[in-house]
Image (cartoon, rainbow, N blue to C red):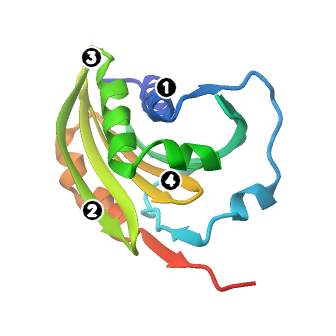
Amino acid sequence: MLSPLTTKITALQAILCIFAAFGLAASAADEEPPDEVFELSAFDMGFHIPSAFTPLGKKRGYLQTDHGKTPYRDFSWKKGDEMIVIRQFVVPEVTWHDKSPSQAFSDAKKNILAAPETKLVSERDYDIAGCSAHTFIFQVEGDGPHFERMDYILTKPDLNIVMYSSPNKAALDDVACQDLFRNIVITLKAPK
């Protein structure tokens, strides 16, 4: 069984693999983007974290892309060995012209599966409020099996990632995980 620290590191490493599909790398700077940079999307993403989970914290920063520094912010919660991570990443405008949603999802899958300990269990495309979305379920081997459901939701200019992570595959079918994903709401912001 993975320790809580290993679980946290594994989950966040998996999230970072996503950005390879968008040509991103972590930025060395400790700068934090201002709140306003996360208000550019025409959409709001709402979610409900199950009450049994406690907050681990928030983090924000920049990732270096081929098109310059780009902002992200993370929120994370934990219950035992299970973890929820939500990341909002403001994708550079030019990136949206380089790839279709299906290409970006395909590239993300390819990059995540480049790690030999990661196996794809299932995936599916879906639409939420007119925005392209994709669900991946992965099994990660190591100190013991570890399972992750990651949903990518594109709300231009944002890539939103919602991840539920557990050492038990059955947890992905339990109420907490199902409620997390069922209660994601994308709404169009009112014009200013």
Question: Is residue 64 or residue 166 the one in the foreground?
Answer: 64
* Sequence-first tag of 4 and 1: 1
Dividing the picture into quadrants, the one containing residue 44 is: bottom right
Residue at image mark 4: 160
The disc placed on residue 171 is none
* Sequence-first tag of 2 and 4: 2
Camera-side mark, 2 or 3: 2
- Label 2 sits on a secondary structure element that is strand
Q: Quadrant of the N terminus?
A: top left
Q: CA distance from mark 1 to mark 2?
A: 28 Å
Q: Position of residue 18 (x, y in %)?
A: 45, 35
Label 1: few (<14), some or many (≥20) within 10 Å?
few
Picture residue at 55% right of the left edge, 79% below the top: 188
Residue at image mark 3: 117
Along the horizontal axis of the image, is 143 left or right of 71?
A: left
Q: Position of residue 10 (x, y in %)?
A: 43, 26
Residue at image mark 1: 9
Q: CA distance from mark 2 to mark 3?
A: 27 Å
* Sequence-first tag of 1 and 2: 1
- Label 3 sits on a secondary structure element that is loop
Q: Position of residue 20 (x, y in %)?
A: 48, 28
Residue furthest out toward the front: 97
* Sequence-first tag of 3 and 4: 3
Question: Is residue 78 or residue 45 the one in the foreground?
Answer: 45
Residue at image mark 2: 126
Picture residue at 27% right of the left edge, 16% below the top: 117
Q: CA distance from mark 3 to mark 4?
A: 25 Å
Label 3: few (<14), some or many (≥20) within 10 Å?
few
Camera-side mark, 3 or 1: 3
Q: CA distance from mark 4 to mark 1?
A: 19 Å
**Circles 1 and 2 in contact, beta carbons < 8 Å:** no
